[in-house]
Amino acid sequence: MKQIVLAFFLLLILVMSGCNNFSEPKISEEEAKSIALKDHTKHIGKVEIISVSHKGNEYIVKWENNDNCENGIDYVNDQNGEITKGEITIC
C-alpha cells in the first residue's frame, strides 16, 4: 500500500512540474514598451503606449500614433525582447 501511495505522489509531482512551462520574464514591462516605441517611431507623429499586459511568455503592448493615423498591438517575447507578432491598423 505504501508503494502505491508513494508512486501516486511521485506521479503527481511529475505532472505538476510539467505543467509549469513558463519561466520568469528576462525583460521588464518598461523594456517591452521601449522595444515597441523604437519599432514604430518614425518621422511623423509621436507613438504613445496605451497599455501593456503580460500573458504566457509575452508582453502585449498596445500603441497608437494619432498624427500618423496608426495604431496596433505588438507581442514581445519576455525572454529575448523579440517582437514575435504585430498588428497594425492605418485609418
Image (cartoon, helix red, strand yellow):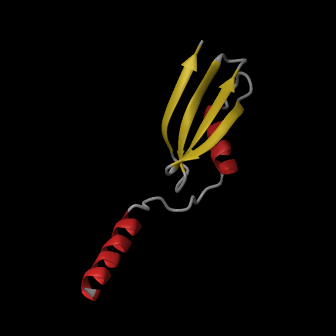
Quadrant of the snapshot with the C terminus? top right
The relative height of residue 69 versus residue 39 in the rendered view (above or below) is above
Q: How many marks?
A: 0
Front position in the image: 72 or 56: 56
Q: Residue at x 67, y 32 (%)?
A: 41
Q: Quadrant of residue 71?
A: top right
Q: Residue at x 50, y 62 (%)?
A: 23
Position of 18 compared to 68: left or right?
left
Position of 63 compared to 85: left or right?
right
Q: Residue at x 70, y 49 (%)?
A: 30
Query: Where residue 79 sits in the image (x, y, percent)?
Result: 52, 56
Front position in the image: 10 or 78: 10
Quadrant of the snapshot with the N terminus? bottom left
| Residue extending furthest toward the bottom | 2
Query: Where residue 2 sits in the image (x, y, percent)?
Result: 28, 87
Query: Where residue 21 sits in the image (x, y, percent)?
Result: 42, 60
Q: Residue at x 67, y 43 (%)?
A: 33
Position of 69 compared to 57: left or right?
right
Front position in the image: 5 or 72: 5
